[in-house]
């Protein structure tokens, strides 16, 4: 069973940046579906970015500010988040081939 652990969350001021990391306990080299989701206070979990079939789809709210990347040699998935806004506050989850991490809290202060 794949185990995913997110890290890199924290408190940041509006306009700041954070890079989230997701470490897998197994190889992700053949993982064709990866992504990041978030759950903001009082809202349902929503897709932030999803990579599937070679295509990368960002939600409109983060397009141009967030970037997903991966390092197969380290079994890690990343989410670079720039120009953060208060509405980006939430718990961020990584997703790899049907498996979820436990989430990491991101709080953006205005």
Image: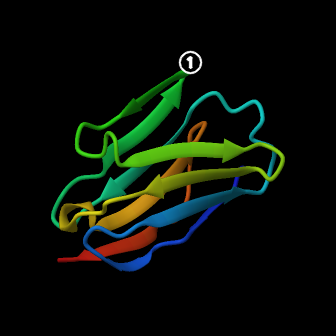
User: Looking at the picture, does residue 75 appear above or below residue 22?
Assistant: above
Residue at 23% x, 63% y is 85
User: Looking at the picture, does residue 95 appear above or below residue 23?
Assistant: above
In the image, residue 3 lies at what x, y percent?
A: 69, 57
Residue at 18% x, 58% y is 43
Which of the two residues, 79 or 47, is positioned nearer the viewer here?
Answer: 79
The secondary element bearing badge 1 is classed as: loop
Q: In which quarter of the image is residue 60?
A: top left
Residue on which the image places disc 1? 53
Residue at 80% x, 49% y is 26
Which of the two residues, 66 or 54, is positioned nearer the viewer here?
Answer: 66
Among all residues in the image, which is located at the extreme top? 53
In the image, residue 69 lies at what x, y percent?
A: 59, 43
How many numbered dots are placed on residues in this image? 1
Near mark 1 (Cα within 10 A), the count class, few <14, some 14-19 or many ≥20, is: few
Is residue 106 toward the left or the right of residue 68 in the image? left
User: Looking at the picture, does residue 24 appear above or below residue 53?
Assistant: below
In the image, residue 52 lies at what x, y percent?
A: 53, 24
- The colour scheme used to paint the residues is rainbow
Residue at 17% x, 77% y is 110
Q: Quadrant of residue 11?
A: bottom left
Is residue 60 toward the left or the right of residue 68 in the image? left
């Amino acid at each position: 069973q794949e185990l995913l652990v997110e890290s890199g969350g924290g408190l940041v001021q509006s306009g700041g940046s954070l890079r989230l990391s997701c470490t897998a306990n197994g190889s992700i080299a053949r993982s064709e579906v990866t992504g990041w989701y978030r759950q903001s206070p009082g809202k349902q979990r929503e897709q932030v970015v999803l990579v599937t079939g070679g295509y990368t789809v960002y939600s409109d709210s983060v397009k141009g500010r967030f970037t997903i990347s991966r390092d197969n040699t380290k079994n890690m998935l990343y989410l670079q988040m720039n120009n953060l806004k208060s509405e980006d506050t939430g718990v961020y989850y990584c997703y790899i081939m049907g498996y979820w991490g436990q989430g990491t809290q991101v709080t953006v202060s205005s």
